[in-house]
Image (tube, grey):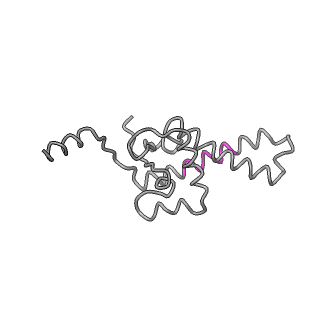
Amino acid sequence: MAEQQDLLNEFLEPTYQYASIGQRFANYLIDVIAFYAILFVIIFLLRDSGLVGSEGFQLFLIFIVFIGYYTLLEGGTGKSVGKMVSKTKVVQVDGTSINFRKAFMRSLCRLVPFEFLSAFGGGSMLHDKWTDTMVVQDSN
């Protein structure tokens, strides 16, 4: 009976192939470039507004663009630009798609200083662990 249950669970539970450390690193590099490109365009568009010279506004803008970049892309599609290129996606640990709230929480966790270094500890990064998410290969 236990063998039948194991076979049934194996059939019903989707299996995922985790994204490699190389893919995660590529995601990071591509996303940093995309983030700065978006930030550059916004600053260029606001150059004559007088706001860009304010250090407080600059920090606010960086924060909003950073949080918005990951929250909107991952919350809407499960993929940042880096994940689109590397053919990976973020899902909840049960395999379901993440929502905007979960994407927002992942974005906030990325603000922890040196959080990106958690990739070198093996396994999941802190923003994955703290939000019960994982980055997996995308079959689409």
The residue positioned 81% from the left and 47% from the top of the image is: 52
How far across and how far down the image is residue 3, in percent? 14, 46
> Magenta span: helix, strand or loop, mainly?
helix
Query: Which residue is at a point 57% across and 54% down the rendered structure image?
Result: 109
Judge from the rendering whether residue 108 lies leftward or rightward of residue 138; answer left or right: right
Image quarter of the C terminus: top left
Name the outermost residue toward the front. 1
Q: Nearer the viewer, residue 62 or 13?
A: 13
| Relative height, residue 75 to residue 125 (above, below) | above
Q: Is residue 87 left or right of residue 55?
A: left
Is 32 colored magenta in this rendering? yes
Tell me the residue at 61%/56% (across/down). Answer: 111
Farthest-out residue, bottom: 121
**Residue 71 belongs to magenta span:** no
Give whichever of 27, 90 is nearer the camera: 90
Give how far across and how far down residue 46 sits, in percent.
Answer: 80, 40
Query: Where does the image place residue 59, in percent across and percent down from the top left?
Result: 74, 53
Q: Which residues are magenta?
A: 29-39
**Residue 29 shown left or right of residue 122 in the figure:** right
Where does the image place residue 116, in percent across and percent down from the top left?
53, 59
Q: Residue at x 15, y 42 (%)?
A: 4
